[in-house]
Amino acid sequence: MFVGCSSTSAADTDTDTDTDSSTGSEESGTAAESSSTGTPLVCEADTTIPAGAAIDPNGTIDPLEWAGAAVVAIPVQATEVNVILSHDGENLNVGFQPLAEGGLIIFPELYIDPMNDKSVMFGADDWWFHTDDQECGAQGMLDAWSECVDDNPDWESTPGLVGPANAVEYSIPFALLGIDLSTSCEIGLAVRVTNTQTVAEIWPAESDRNEPVTWATVALDTDF
Ligand SMILES: [Ca+2]
Ligand SMILES: [Ca+2]
């Protein structure tokens, strides 16, 4: 659970290191400070993205650059892809590895709801990112393949390296996404890997990329 980012928050427990929201929520004792509806007036999240170093999105997952990052796993056939999450105060950083196992090559995708307004349908503010041989990204539209370019100057990833390099790293400016860390501390997020044909696996499990309301609420660590 992440607290302290809402002006109405009465709780002040420090649980920065706890990325398990279900445990944190149950143990935090905020029920005593709940509103009359029983809903705690705190900025809660399923997962916290820690603040860390800037990364070099070169397709090599360096443990030093990703030190302290959060990791979620997406089961894919007989293996699982690790999705590594951090931010450096200026950029949201996301790494995917491995992306080529047992003859299967899969591509990473991000879905970001900057205001976490959790609309039922993919909204005009919501972002889609996909990296294969090119960098593809668009706001307000999924699968905007016409937007794919070899190198988008607005954000960084690792196009063309899926295969032997086995990893893709993203570094996406908060300014591009429309996220101001001084006024917001949470976003909606889903991540997916797909070969665009027969395989598509998403985190959170059971979420739908077309429906931001089903995506994870993710807190951005602002203690840096
Ligand atoms: Ca790197
Ligand atoms: Ca939205």
Image: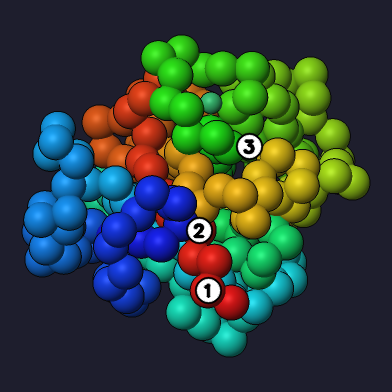
CA gap, disc 3 to disc 1? 30 Å
CA gap, disc 2 to disc 1? 9 Å
Left or right for 198, reference 110: left
Circle 1 sits on which residue?
A: 223
In the rendered image, residue 43, in percent from the top left (x then y), is placed at 37, 50
Query: Which label's residue is closer to the chain start, 3 or 2?
Result: 3
Under tag 2, what secondary structure? strand
Circle 3 sits on which residue?
A: 130
Callout 2 touching callout 1 (CB < 8 Å): no
* Residue 176 visible in the picture: yes
Circle 2 sits on which residue?
A: 220
Q: Amino acid at mark 1?
A: Asp
Q: Quadrant of residue 104?
A: top left
Residue drawn 63% across the image and 24% down it: 125
CA gap, disc 3 to disc 2? 22 Å
In this rendering, the answer to whether 105 lies above or below 85 is above
Query: Which label's residue is closer to the chain start, 3 or 1?
Result: 3
Left or right for 23, reference 199: left
State the residue lying farthest toward the right. 153
